[in-house]
């Protein structure tokens, strides 16, 4: 069973790949409501005011009443016949809901009435057939810019009208991270990249494998990079082999160190601690 979770106060909202959606009060150990919508859910969850947003594997977008699970709005979008690895992606800002489906279409809706403002297809294929597979990453938005990608390109898109602000011929392997007016990501060819959001200009692009080789004064080898995080104004890059790299914001490699065990979950950062599950599903807490 694959679960999608989002937490608000003491309520955990959950959707799964069997088509169930429910709300659970973990303090009272009580299910508030639970409903079966028959079709597997396939997206992250988002909350805004009294609404819960989700999408299923048929690329149907839902707006639910979070108090009882009632469907407030159902919006069908293009369905793909072949299910790929990409999962429908939802993102919110103050006024809009952004939805990137497995067909490669990016939609922007007004949150209050779910009115469609614009949509844009990011699928690189010249034959937009339901059998075509779209590969991308989870979308991110910051201020009035949406950051999205497909298998070849990375985009900065105006949230108000869908115009492309900038486009680069690389695709991220990690979800982009934003701090102030700067964006950071790792590309699929293992480059650490920083972009100025305001003007869309590339600040730097560093080969991570070469950075490691120079730091250790050793031969260049290929590493597998797993996660990217911003902690205390430092860039942390986690590797598959449990090592991590710490960079300053200008791309200077400061530290190469090793975690006590391999990551098996997304790390949580709380009270100056890093908390994660290891490969044995044990909780690991480090400074």
Image (cartoon, rainbow, N blue to C red):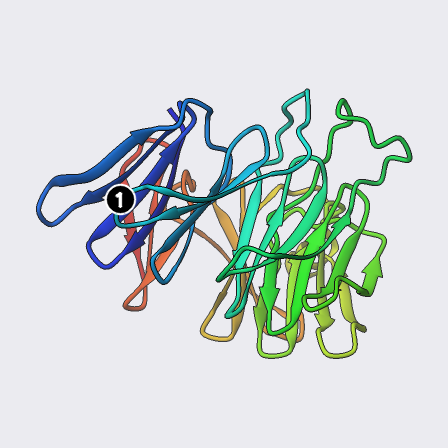
Q: Residue at x 60, y 74 (%)?
A: 143
x then y, percent, for residue 160: 69, 69
Closer to the camera in the image, 35 or 128: 35
Closer to the camera in the image, 244 or 218: 244
Closer to the camera in the image, 98 or 203: 98
Q: Residue at x 31, y 68 (%)?
A: 272
Residue lying farthest left?
Answer: 28
- Specify whether 255 is left or right of 29: right
x then y, percent, for residue 32: 18, 42
Residue 253 shows in this picture: yes
x then y, percent, for residue 197: 71, 74
- Specify whether 10 is left or right of 228: left
Give the position of the C terminus as an image quadrant: bottom left
- Specify whether 130 is left or right of 30: right
- Where 85 sits versus 266, above or below? above
Give the position of the N terminus as an image quadrant: top left
x then y, percent, for residue 18: 40, 23
Which picture quadrant has residue 178? Answer: bottom right
Closer to the camera in the image, 73 or 206: 73
**Count of labels shown?**
1
Other-residue count near label 1 (Cα within 10 Å), few / some / many at <14 / 14–19 / ≥20:
few
Residue denoted by label 1: 68
Element type at mark 1? loop
Residue 237 shows in this picture: no
Q: Residue at x 75, y 25 (%)?
A: 130
């Amino acid at each position: 069973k694959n679960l999608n979770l989002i937490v608000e106060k003491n309520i955990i909202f959950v959707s799964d790949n069997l088509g169930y959606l429910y709300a659970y009060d973990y303090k009272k150990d009580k299910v508030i409501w639970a409903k079966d919508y028959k079709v597997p859910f396939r997206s992250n969850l988002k909350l805004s005011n009294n609404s819960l947003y989700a999408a299923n594997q048929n690329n149907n977008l839902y707006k639910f009443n979070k108090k009882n699970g009632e469907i407030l709005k159902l919006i069908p979008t293009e369905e793909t016949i072949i299910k790929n690895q990409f999962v429908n992606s939802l993102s919110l800002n103050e006024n809009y809901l952004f939805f990137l489906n497995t067909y490669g279409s990016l939609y922007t809706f007004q949150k209050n009435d779910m009115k469609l403002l614009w949509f844009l297809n990011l699928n690189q294929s010249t034959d937009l057939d339901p059998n075509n597979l779209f590969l991308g990453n989870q979308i991110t938005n910051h201020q009035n810019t949406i950051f999205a990608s497909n298998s070849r390109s990375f985009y900065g898109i105006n949230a108000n009208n869908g115009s492309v602000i900038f486009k680069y011929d690389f695709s991220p392997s990690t979800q982009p991270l934003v701090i102030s007016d700067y964006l950071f990501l790792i590309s699929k060819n293992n480059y650490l990249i920083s972009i100025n959001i305001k003007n869309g200009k590339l600040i730097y692009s560093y080969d991570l494998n070469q950075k490691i080789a120079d730091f250790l004064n050793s031969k260049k080898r290929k590493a597998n990079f797993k996660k990217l995080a911003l902690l205390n104004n430092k860039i942390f890059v986690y590797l598959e082999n449990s090592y991590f790299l710490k960079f300053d914001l200008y791309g200077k490699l400061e530290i190469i160190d090793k975690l006590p065990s391999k990551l098996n979950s997304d790390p949580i950062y709380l009270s100056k601690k890093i908390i994660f599950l290891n490969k044995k599903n044990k909780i690991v807490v480090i400074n």
